[in-house]
Amino acid sequence: MSNVIALLHGPNLNLLGQREVDIYGTTTEADLLALVEKGAAGHGMTVEFFQSNHEGELVDQVHVVRHTCAAIVINGGALSHYGWSLHDALATFEGPVIEVHLSNTSKREPWRHTSVLTPVASGTIMGLGPHGYELAVDAIARLLNK
C-alpha cells in the first residue's frame, strides 16, 4: 500500500495569509503544506500537494491519486458547497478522505452550512485553523493503522 497522502486545495486557498485574515488567519498555504508534511513524516508517510482554482483540475487530480495515494486530505474551499463533480470523483477513492476547513463553516453564511463533500468523506474537521490539518493527518494514520 502507498504511504502517500494527497493534500488537495480548492479555489482561493493559494491566497491564504493574504485574504480575509480575520477568518482564515495569517498562515499561508506553504505553511499548511509544511505542517502536513511534518505530521505525515511522523507517521512514515509523505505528501503530494495540489491546488487549483478550477473544479475540473481537482477532479482530474482525484482521478490521478486514486492510483498513487493511500488517503486524501481536502479543503475544497467554496467547491465544498456546490462541487458535485468533485463529490463524484471523491466517491471513487477507496482510501480515507478527510475534509478540512480552517473556519467553522456552520457559523458563517447559510450557503456554507452544507458541504457536498461531507457525504463521501471519512470525516470532517472544521473551525480549528491549521491544527485541523494536523488532526487530519493523525486521523488518516489511525484509519490506515500506520
Image: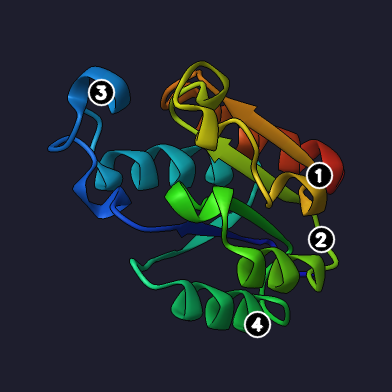
Real-space CA distance between mark 3 and mark 1, rounded to the nearest whole angstrom: 26 Å
Residue behind mark 2: 95
Estimate the spatial distance between the alpha carbons at disc 4 and disc 3, rounded to whole Å.
Answer: 31 Å
Image depth: mark 2 or mark 1 in front: 1
Position of residue 77 measured from the top left corner of the image (x, y, whole percent):
44, 48
Decide which of tag 4 and tag 1 comes sooner along the chain. Answer: 4
Side of 57 where 15 appears, left or right? left
Q: Which residue is mark 4?
A: 63
The circle on residue 25 is 3
Q: Position of residue 104 (x, y in %)?
A: 51, 21
Q: Which residue is mark 1?
A: 122
Badge 1 crowding class, 10 Å Cα cut-off, few under 14, some 14 to 19, many 20 or more, is: some
- Classify 144 as above or below 88: above
User: Mark 3 vs mark 2: which is more N-terminal?
Assistant: 3
Q: Position of residue 22 (x, y in %)?
A: 22, 18
Give the residue type at disc 1.
Ser
User: Of discs 4 and 2, which sits in the foreground?
Assistant: 4
* Residue displayed at 84% across by 48% down: 144
- Snapshot quadrant of residue 54: bottom left
